[in-house]
Amino acid sequence: MVADTKSTASNGAVAKFFIKVFTGAHAGLYRLSGGRVGAKMRGTPVLLLDSVGRQSGQTRTTPLVYLR
């Protein structure tokens, strides 16, 4: 059985798009609420990691789940 590579590629692109939208929305809500909304994801603490691109100098924010 041969997998449909076009379908698989488009599914990956759709998943990547939704992940990008979700993380952006999560970070925005977290910042706007001062950490009251989005500070925990399913009971696990979340922090916002800011990093700066080495070549671009662009700041990126990533929600990161951590354990205590």
Image (tube, rainbow, N blue to C red):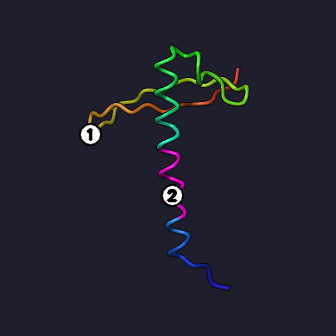
Instruction: Say which of marks 2 and 1 sits in front.
Output: 2
Residue receiving disc 2? 14
Residue 13 marker: none
Q: Earlier in the sequence, mark 2 or mark 1?
A: 2
Up/down of 16 relative to 27, above or below: below
Quadrant of the rendered structure where residue 15 is? bottom right
User: In x, y percent, where is residue 47?
Assistant: 56, 23
Q: Which residues are magenta?
A: 11-20
The amino acid beneath tag 2 is Val
- Taking the view exactly as shown, the residue that stands out farthest to the right is 43
User: In x, y percent, where is residue 33?
Assistant: 51, 16
What secondary structure is found at the residue carrying circle 2? Answer: helix
- Residue drawn at x 50%, y 68% as measured from the top left: 9
Check residue 14 for magenta coloring: yes
Check residue 27 for magenta coloring: no
User: In x, y percent, where is residue 37?
Assistant: 58, 21
Q: Quadrant of the N terminus?
A: bottom right
Quadrant of the rendered structure where residue 60 is? top left
Q: Is residue 11 left or right of residue 32?
A: right
- Taking the view exactly as shown, the residue that stands out farthest to the bottom is 1
The amino acid beneath tag 1 is Gln
User: In x, y percent, where is residue 53?
Assistant: 33, 36
Could you tell me how far apart the alpha carbons at marks 2 and 1 are, in whole angstroms?
A: 27 Å
